[in-house]
Image (cartoon, rainbow, N blue to C red):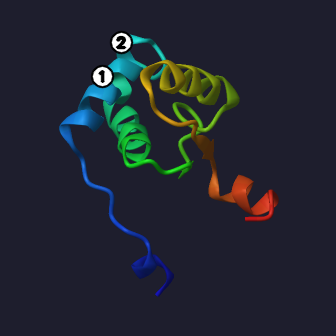
Amino acid sequence: SLIQDFPVLENSPAAERVAKKYIEEKIIPPNAFNDALHLAITVVNKKDILLSWDFAHLVNSKVERKVNAYNLISGYSRIRIVSPDGLMKEGG
């Protein structure tokens, strides 16, 4: 199956720290720690795209800009945050 080809990304102390910073910096709301952690795990594992259906906390240009600004000053790479539909519309 297609999903078997994707590695499972693990949580780590570094991802926990980044998730907390996303909340401290008011990038992700305090009541959405799991969303911040999902994003941080992706960033810490050096992936360049996060697919999500979470339009409230993750999939919007304002959040993506703030995340990438924080990532830049913190030594992490830029990340794209898009919905699966959005990725397909861009040509996959």
Q: Amino acid at mark 1?
A: Lys
Quadrant of the image containing the C terminus: bottom right
Say which residue label 2 marks: 24
In the picture shown, does residue 40 fall above or below 24? below
Give the numbered dot on residue 34: none
Rendered residue at 53%/42% (across/down):
54
Q: Which residue occupies the extreme bottom position in the image?
A: 1
In the picture shown, does residue 89 fall above or below 75? below
Q: Amino acid at mark 2?
A: Glu
Rendered residue at 33%/64% (across/down):
8
Rendered residue at 74%/63% (across/down):
88
The secondary structure type at the circle numbered 1 is helix
Near-viewer residue (9 or 23) = 9
The secondary structure type at the circle numbered 2 is helix
Residue 66: x, y in percent? 58, 20
The residues bearing labels 2 and 1 have C-alpha atoms spaced at a distance of: 6 Å
Residue 3: x, y in percent? 45, 77
Near-viewer residue (30 or 75) = 75
Quadrant in which residue 68 is drawn: top right
Residue 91: x, y in percent? 80, 64
Q: Which residue occupies the extreme top position in the image?
A: 25
In the picture shown, does residue 16 fall above or below 89? above
Q: Is residue 52 among what the camera can see?
A: no
The answer to whether residue 57 is left or right of residue 45 is: right
- Asked whether the residues under the numbered discs 2 and 1 touch, taking CB atoms below 8 Å apart as contact, a structural biologist would say yes
Say which residue label 1 marks: 20
